[in-house]
Amino acid sequence: MNSYITGAMIKELREQNSMTQSELAERLGVSDKAVSKWETGRGYPDITLFQPIADVFQISVVELLSGAAVTNTNVAANMLRSRFYVCPVCGNTVHSMGQSVVSCHGIVLPPLEAEEAEGKHEIVLQKAEDEYFVFVDHEMTKEHYISFLAAVSSDRVQIVKLYPEGNAEARFKISGVRMLYFYCNRDGLFRKRIK
């Protein structure tokens, strides 16, 4: 945790809410000198104060610690704005429909940037009645594998979790699918647009 980031965030939020250091200190039951130390990076708030500070400013603790407030501009909740996050510690996969602050194992996860699926990471797509059969010709060992395949339309996301030593394939309902994604544990996120 970076005291400068957390302190700068506290100062920014306090000023946005037209609050003095004394007013914030009173609401938290600390001295105004303590708030001053946090804001100048000369100290951290006690861990027991993170949630009360976040509550005062109506943000999450993750936003407070990361120094980045999240504003929901994704009112339409269009699934085509999907973002994927993968924890480097446990491999946990998280999906969001827009900007988010995602944390796993104490690490703030950046959204993955998808590359076009081509070359050794090409997606093979076959249509069978009302489904797409999706296959990635990729090794599936414990060291190098595809973790998930996802099909995204404007109103839904279909995700299939894959496991090492299995096959890198899945079936998805065709209904409105516009984008396919898959995640390689070594090379990252790939996508293919469906026309």
Image: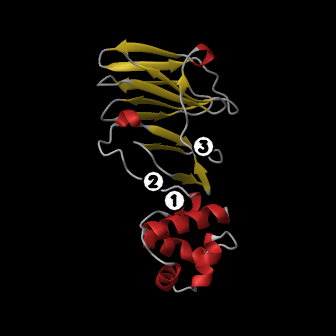
Position of residue 46 measured from the top left corner of the image (x, y, whole percent): 62, 77
Amino acid marked by disc 3: Gly
Q: Residues within 10 Å of mark 3 (few under 14, many from 20)?
A: few
Residue 66, horizontal then vertical, whole percent: 58, 57
Which residue bears the numbered disc 1? Answer: 63
Provide residue 42's location: percent of width, then percent of height.
70, 72
Q: Is residue 41 above or below residue 76?
A: below
**Disc 2 versus disc 3: nearer the observer:** 2
Q: How far apart are marks 2 and 3 (CA)?
A: 24 Å
From mark 2 to mark 1, how far is it between C-alphas? 7 Å
Viewer-nearest residue: 147 or 51:
51
User: Which residue is denoted by mark 2 in the rendering?
Assistant: 70
The amino acid beneath tag 1 is: Glu
Note whether residue 105 is visible: no
Give the residue at mark 3. Answer: 91
Query: Considering the image in quadrants, where does the C terminus appear?
Result: top left
Q: Earlier in the sequence, mark 2 or mark 1?
A: 1
Task: Using residue 145 as the reference point, say whether residue 181 is left or right of it.
Answer: left
